């Protein structure tokens, strides 16, 4: 990402300028505040069972709508990291089939998703299908 303004914590959704530090990994980011919370959770770990994801059918609509942009932002960050890795692999002449195998996808699927020509063709077909 080109600017800290576009980097958000993958856990709380805060932008980099809103926190002291952001730790960046491949397609994922965590702020110092979330790291501190994780440390507290780990220290307090009593060995009890781990909480499951919420039952989305029981979460109020407004809360689901509030979560959408945060999750979409995380997805964008992960997608950007994935594109960067695929671009580097292609720069190293790694075949599409090998990349697809690593991702558990077909050669055709990764070519369509990550090649500039594949994205152009997919965009044109999607635009043609809209009404």
Image: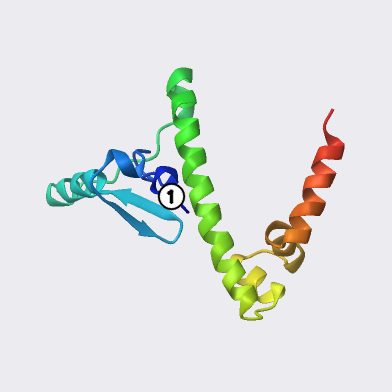
Q: Position of residue 70 (x, y in %)?
A: 45, 36
Total marks in image? 1
- Vertical placement of residue 28 versus 74, above or below: below
Q: Identify the residue at the far bottom of this view.
A: 93
The image quarter containing residue 90 is bottom right
Q: Position of residue 42 (x, y in %)?
A: 18, 51
Residue 74 lies left or right of residue 22; in this view the side is: right
Residue drawn 58% across the image and 60% down it: 83
Residue drawn 40% across the image and 39% down it: 53
- Vertical placement of residue 40 versus 66, above or below: below
Q: Position of residue 62 (x, y in %)?
A: 45, 18
Residue drawn 50% across the image and 32% down it: 68
Q: Position of residue 128 (x, y in %)?
A: 87, 38
Q: Is residue 45 visible?
A: no
Residue drawn 41% across the image and 54% down it: 28
The image quarter containing residue 127 is top right
Q: Identify the residue at the far front of this view.
A: 3
Quadrant for the C terminus in the image:
top right
- Nearer to us in this view, 115 or 11: 115
Could you classify mark 1 by the number of other residues whose Cα lies within 10 Å: few (under 14), some (14-19), or many (20 or more)? Answer: few
Q: Which residue is mark 1?
A: 3
What colour scheme was applied to this rendering of the protein?
rainbow
What is the secondary structure assignment of the residue under circle 1?
loop
Q: Is residue 121 visible?
A: yes
């Amino acid at each position: 990402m080109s600017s800290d303004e576009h980097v958000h914590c993958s856990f709380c959704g805060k932008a980099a300028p809103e926190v002291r530090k952001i730790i960046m990994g491949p397609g994922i980011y965590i702020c110092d505040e979330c790291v501190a919370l994780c440390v507290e959770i780990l220290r307090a770990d009593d060995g009890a069972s781990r909480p499951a994801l919420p039952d989305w059918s029981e979460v109020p609509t407004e809360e689901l709508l509030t979560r959408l942009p945060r999750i979409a932002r995380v997805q964008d960050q992960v997608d950007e990291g994935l594109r960067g890795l695929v671009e580097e692999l292609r720069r190293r002449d790694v075949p599409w089939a090998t990349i697809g195998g690593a991702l558990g996808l077909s050669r055709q699927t990764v070519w369509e998703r990550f090649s500039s020509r594949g994205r152009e063709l997919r965009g044109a077909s999607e635009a043609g299908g809209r009404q």
